[in-house]
Image (cartoon, rainbow, N blue to C red):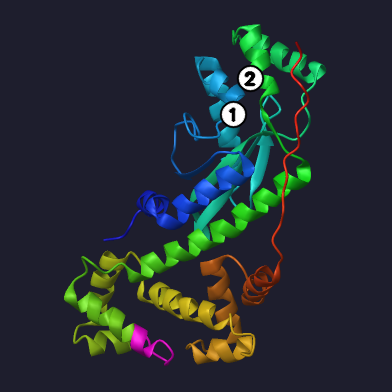
Amino acid sequence: MKTSDADMIQRLGRSNLYTDFKQAFGASTGLPLTLRPLEFWQLAHCGQPHESPLCALLEQTNRGCSSCLEAEQRAVDAARDRSATVRCFADLCHTAVAVKLGEHAIGYLVTGQAALDLPSKERFEAVARQLTDKGIRIGRKRLVHAYYHSKVLSPEQYAGLIRLLEIFSQQLSGIASRLMVQDAEAEPPMVRRARAYITAHQADRIDLDNVAKAMHVSTCYFCKIFKKATGLTFTEYLGRVRVEKVKTLLLNPHLRISEIAYGTGFQSLTHFNRVFREITGEAPTAFRDNRTSRSKEPPINRGTRVAAGEPS
């Protein structure tokens, strides 16, 4: 049976990779991080470590909670094709980065609740007026304390952490793709045999009729059972198997991309480039360059700007 997008995000969220990354991300940036599905009607970071004290304060009122939800959703809505950052009325950034399976988003990495400018009396008064206009009543002393304890990062630091999330989202997307290919626990024996056959012959010029014949069933019956069990058509599944092999081979700088394409069963470079981009979200050359450049990058030492002192 096909794994739903929400189920896939849930599985990724339980993985050691995500858990470890989230902990390291929070420790190094001081910001919260949430992996959320497409449909999500809760505040992403409510009650989590590193939640902004200002956001936590606003969430205690119905109107403040609605305003926070609206800002997070605006970031998600703008992040269909690339990462997106919006600012809420309190001048805090909210960022969403899509996790994709092929060309479509299955969930989002959400972070933020950070200011990119040092707090000031003028900015505080502007926030206080916004709260009054929205009918949000919070004691001034509590509001002052929360505002001046907001996390502050430089625009360069914030851009850097967004790039880290973009890289991590590609890793999660790759894992989702492999899970989709490898999920065979509850498959009919015929589908398991078909998957094994496809893996063994993925570099050959095989087609649907070949595989159905090898399984000793009609093409129509095979299509029906295979799609029901895997959630993918034969062509989609074969493309994913081949692309997973390609991704490994691209890490070898001595192999030409054309050599890899034909060696994994693709019959033309045009078809190869189209399928690879549909599944990974980037061109083969960009995929190779990104992985190669990242392996050569020196460690980045990032600091945190110190916020201006809270007024007495």
Q: Residues within 10 Å of mark 1 (few under 14, many from 20)?
A: many
Q: Is residue 99 rendered to the left or right of residue 189?
A: right
Magenta-drawn segment: 199-207
Q: SS of the residue at dot 2?
A: helix
Q: Is residue 120 left or right of residue 211?
A: right
Name the residue located 49 percent from the left edge and 77 percent from the top edge: 243
Q: Quadrant of the N terminus?
A: bottom left
Neighbours of disc 2 within 10 Å: few (<14), some (14-19), many (20+): some
Check the image and report above or below for 254 versus 45. below
**Which residue is at 75% across, 35% downward?**
116
Is residue 190 within the magenta segment? no
| Residue 108 in sight from this viewpoint | no
Q: Is residue 204 magenta?
A: yes
Q: Are marks 1 and 2 in contact (CB under 8 Å)?
A: yes
On-image quarter of the C terminus: top right
Q: Residue at x 66, y 49 (%)?
A: 161
Which of the labelled discs sits on residue 294, or is there none? none
- Residue 127 horizontal/vertical position (percent): 71, 17
Amino acid at dot 2: Ala
Q: Earlier in the sequence, mark 1 or mark 2?
A: 1
Q: Residue at x 58, y 70 (%)?
A: 277
Q: Position of residue 223 (x, y in %)?
A: 28, 74
Q: Which residue is mark 2?
A: 146
Image x and y of residue 53, in percent: 59, 24
Q: Amino acid at mark 1?
A: Ser
Distance from label 1 to label 2 (Cα)? 8 Å
Provide the secondary structure element on which disc 1 rests: loop
Q: Which residue is mark 1?
A: 52
